[in-house]
Image: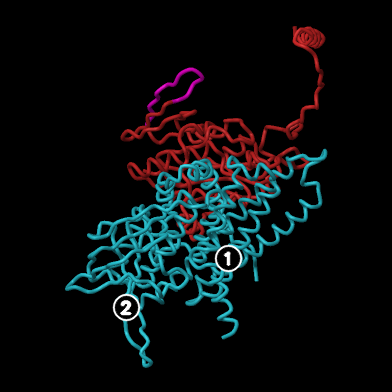
Amino acid sequence: MDFTLDKKHEMARNLFKEFAETEVKPLAQETDETEEFPMETVKKMQKYGFMGIPVPKEYGGQGCDPLTYTMCVEELSKVCATTGVVVSAHTSLCVDPILTYGTEEQKQKYVRPLATGEKLGAFALTEPGAGTDAQGAQTKAVLDGDEWVLNGSKCFITNGKVADVYIVIAITSVVEDKRGRKKKNFSAFIVDKDAPGFSFGTKEKKMGIRGSSTYELIFEDCRIPKENLLGPEGKGFPIAMHTLDGGRIGIAAQALGIAEGAFERAVAYTKERKQFGRSIAAQQNTQFKLADMATRIEAAQLLVYKAAMAKATQKVYSVEAAKAKLFAAETAMAVTTEVVQLFGGYGYIREYDVERMMRDAKITEIYEGTSEVQRMVISGAVLK
Amino acid sequence: MKIVVCIKQVPDTKGGVKFNPDGTLDRAAMLAIMNPDDKAGLEAALRIKDEIGAEVTVLTMGLPKADDVLREALAMGADNAILVTDRVLGGADTWATSTTIAGALRNIDYDLIITGRQAIDGDTAQVGPQIAEHLGLPVISYAEDIKVDGNSVIVKRQYEDRYHEVKAQMPCLITALSELNEPRYMTPGGIFDAYDKEVTVWGRADLKDVDDSNLGLKGSPTKIAKASDKVRKGAGEKVTLDAAESVTYLMDKLKEKHVI
């Protein structure tokens, strides 16, 4: 077992780090303050292939592996968690399911422009009454001649208004089991932004990742071509769950990046900040806190990379993804909270990055499956 | 069109500098990057490739670990890479280096050779023009803009207060300034491809028309008497005086040191 990165992964990490430091970091604070989507950065990432890292070259991607993509989200999130989630939601939640379940025509039509970054993707499962209980969703799709007609709404959709292509999960039939209980059958659909009957609701005002575009999606007799059904009819729920397994690795990488970014700032700050005549890094309280954080971050990184490797080699990687997301997200929250404490009053001021990082960290414990959902997945496997 | 870009792996300016006992740089012990002027030269070549089509080959002389900068160049978009490495070439000054590189270049076809103006470790700005001299090529140094015009290149050559527009027929050699352009990033897929590609490795035996007496440390007329890292400034002297006293104090000090 070798825990060192090979040369090409090391070079890719250096690329992402340099890009993040030069192109993303200078805009991070402004993106948070203005709550504006970082479109200029996305265009630059498009130019350098960051929007299709794990996609095969035949579909316009970079032909790299999930680990490379994971490191990209990690490095971006070290300086700006908003930019990290833009790439993660696009790649894991929109490109990946089309690549996995799409027909050759769908891949040619949708994956290629998404992987080159010409178009941006999003994924819509959550509804006002259906979060963790995704089965509670109400959005319906009915086949009418050569078109599916969608009705309902989705909420908290990342890349909401800026995306061009949406994966939408909707009920296509309700059946009764032997005991007379009603069971919803879901299907997955590819919806273009300009589909008739598709509109946007309110923009969410959020605690963190404030530059990411989070919107409500509204479908009112929204008509899409019959061939935009993704995967077999009635298989939408397993498609959504499998998609979220991949998405969780992206969010785990985002959480890891936030923790690492906050930690780097803490190391620099505690060496500089003097109290009682010496740097606070010279105090054992600080040293022990830094030691605990460093250990926890490395453990999180190993879990995240293991999950990324599992995605590359295994068909099912739900448990690896759940463990990585659970631990990385809780690490991000714990580390950023502790780093704000080390910064003292300055940590509470918006001028310093760590205040933003603590706000950004919280969502990683919530979206794409709360920490409680991850515990359900993990314990389910343990007790099987 | 065929372009060869000569690049050099240099110590990272952010890292520390270490020396061998003979005064030459201990390159193996230092973090390394692609020399900034060379990177601008590579970017210029890649832009010509994007605009009118060209085959871009990168060439370096160095330790086996110089393979890293060649892979970086491939990941940015270069087509081929050649590493010239051999123990007998070690410790070369500008003369021995340019002799070596010219010996390697005699094996390949080119229309244009681009080198950086100078490397941030030696800062001599001699190797590029020397290569041209060895190969009998026209040279335009200090290029801040390069345009291809048929069989010629039109280059803005930088001076302190002006520039000259110089036209030369190819084949020729240009030395590039880092101000020439903003080099592109690599792409992730470019990196993966770069590690799948073969880097051509040449040793002493592959150099054409060169004499052993002009190679390596032995073939280097430059003898380094002493080399050192930046000398740290002393802590200085702190005094607290009012404005008038400060002026008198400073004047006295300047007179004492015979500055005025």
Q: Which mark is residue A305?
A: 1
**Residue A193, located in which quarter of the rendered image?**
bottom left
Q: Secondary structure at mark 2?
A: loop
C-alpha span from label 2 to label 1: 31 Å
Q: Which residues are magenta?
A: B157-169
User: Which class describes the residues within 10 Å of circle 1: few (<14), some (14-19), or many (20+)?
Assistant: many
Q: Amino acid at mark 1?
A: Tyr
Main SS of residues in magenta: strand
Q: Residue furthest left?
A: A145
A266 or A156, which lies in front?
A156
The chain letter of the red chain reads B
Q: Secondary structure at mark 1?
A: helix
Question: The N terminus of chain B lies in which quarter of the figure?
Answer: top left
B178 or A328, which lies in front?
A328
Queried whether the magenta region covers residue A167, the answer comes back as no
Give the residue displayed 24% in from the left and 60% down from the top. Answer: A197
Q: In this figure, which residue is indicated by the disc labeled 2?
A: A232
Letter of the chain that mark 1 sits on in the rendering: A
Along the polypeptide, which appears first: circle 2 or circle 1?
Answer: 2
Pinpoint residue B128: horizontal percent, then vertical percent.
Answer: 53, 34
Q: Residue furthest bottom?
A: A178
Give the residue displayed 40% in from the left and 25% down from the top. Answer: B166
Left or right: A241 as drawn, with respect to A283 = left
Q: Which of labels 2 and 1 is toward the front?
A: 2
